[in-house]
Amino acid sequence: MNARRVAFLLPHMRPGGAERAVLNWCKALDRSRFAPMLMLKRAEGAFLEEVPDDVPVIDLGGARAARLPGRIRTMLRGHGVEIAYSATSAMNLALCAAARGTRTKVVISEHTSPRAYLAQAKWPFVRRAVMRRLLPRADALFVPTEAIGAELSDIVPKLPPATVIPNPVVDRIDFCRPRERTADAPLRLVSAGRLVPAKAFDILIDACALLRDRGLAFLLIIHGEGPEEAPLRARTASLGLSHQVLLAGHAADLSQRLAEADLFVLASRREGFGNVLVEAMAAGTPVLAAASDGPRGLIEDGRTGCLVPVDDAAALAAAIIAIAAAPDAAAARAAAAQETAARYDIAASAKALADSFARL
């Protein structure tokens, strides 16, 4: 039997959680069952360098929202796509509009809180109405957590039942801690994510000013790219932190950077899941996060990591100081967290995805 053609639709391949999940699936899907391809609104982003050679990348030309469904429909038909999986709210709408009248099975997905997205969207009532009209055309809904599925189904009542597919994050876990901090070395903090307001790097930088004022020796390295880079650099400079807070851009070897850290910090205001949090857990690095939806589902506070309130620089700084003062307790939490990370194995996730595709 020939492998079924499955297309993954994304706006781009800039580093992000949904993009990383799709990239890992493209690498791991059983080629005897499925032949994956990428359809991108714009064929751009650092993750393009990691796309396997046997995965075609189709550039949809940056079409505007009104024209995008037509471009997608043409590509679905032209490439004989049997299953199309879309990630992000905008691509879900475009795919559902495009696939009507084709033989393509439509799978929509969400990787972040739909309510939080609507709260920040332009014309949220219009967006909600369009979602309710178009999304029920989907043949399946795949989500990384039950909470995201329940939230979307509450907003769009006629959706198919949600199927939970664990995110594909780690392919191997070294259960030996790769790095120990020397007593006189600065605390090495690492964070990562798109440089956008939702990731709250501004709050993390403010927390670093408090750490300095309280006499803690530290170095924070932030990996990521995005539109907030200039404002964040300006904030760092204005607080006199340019030598202690580094914006290091995209890291192709992020797992190694995480393993070298004393503490991974995720300050996000909203986080549907938190792939990078799982990567840090897998690396054996202690984790601290603001208690948005994703981290609350991944971290058992006090046992596998630490949680603090969202948008609270003082609480973030206090937690970092407490963790630095008790390295043995932090190491014990990090060891327990590796068991959590093991649930998000890439091969197991790809098999779950393939089996769910097959049931369509």
Image (spheres, grey):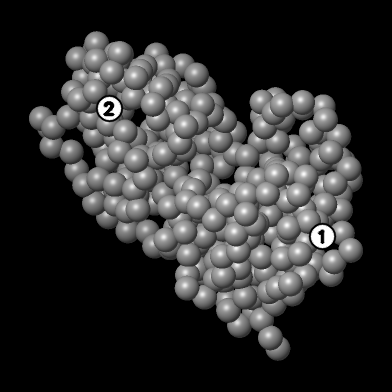
Q: Can the viewer see residue 51?
A: yes
Categorize mark 2 by other alpha carbons within 10 Å: few (<14), some (14-19), many (20+): many
SS assignment at label 2: strand
Residue at the spot of label 1: 99
> Where residue 327 appears, x then y in whole percent?
25, 33
Residue extending furthest bottom? 1
Instruction: Residue 345: give its label.
Output: none
Q: Which amino acid type is marked by label 1?
A: Ala
Residue 312 vs residue 3: left or right?
A: left
Residue extending furthest left? 184
Residue at figure coordinates x 51%, y 42% from the top left: 274
Residue at figure coordinates x 60%, y 59% from the top left: 59
SS assignment at label 1: loop
Residue 100 vs residue 169: left or right?
A: right
Residue at the spot of label 2: 245
> Where residue 79 appears, x then y in whole percent?
70, 73
Residue extending furthest top? 213
- Closer-to-camera residue (275/34): 34
> Quadrant location of the C terminus?
bottom right
Q: Can the viewer see residue 343?
A: no
Q: Which amino acid type is marked by label 2?
A: Val
Q: Nearer the viewer, mark 2 or mark 1?
A: 1
> Where residue 201 appears, x then y in whole percent?
42, 26
Categorize mark 1 by other alpha carbons within 10 Å: few (<14), some (14-19), many (20+): many
Residue 230 vs residue 209: left or right?
A: right
> Where residue 219 appears, x then y in whole percent?
23, 29
Residue at figure coordinates x 43%, y 62% from the top left: 50
Asked if marks 2 and 1 touch (Cβ < 8 Å), the reply is no
- Closer-to-camera residue (30/78): 78
Q: Earlier in the sequence, mark 2 or mark 1?
A: 1
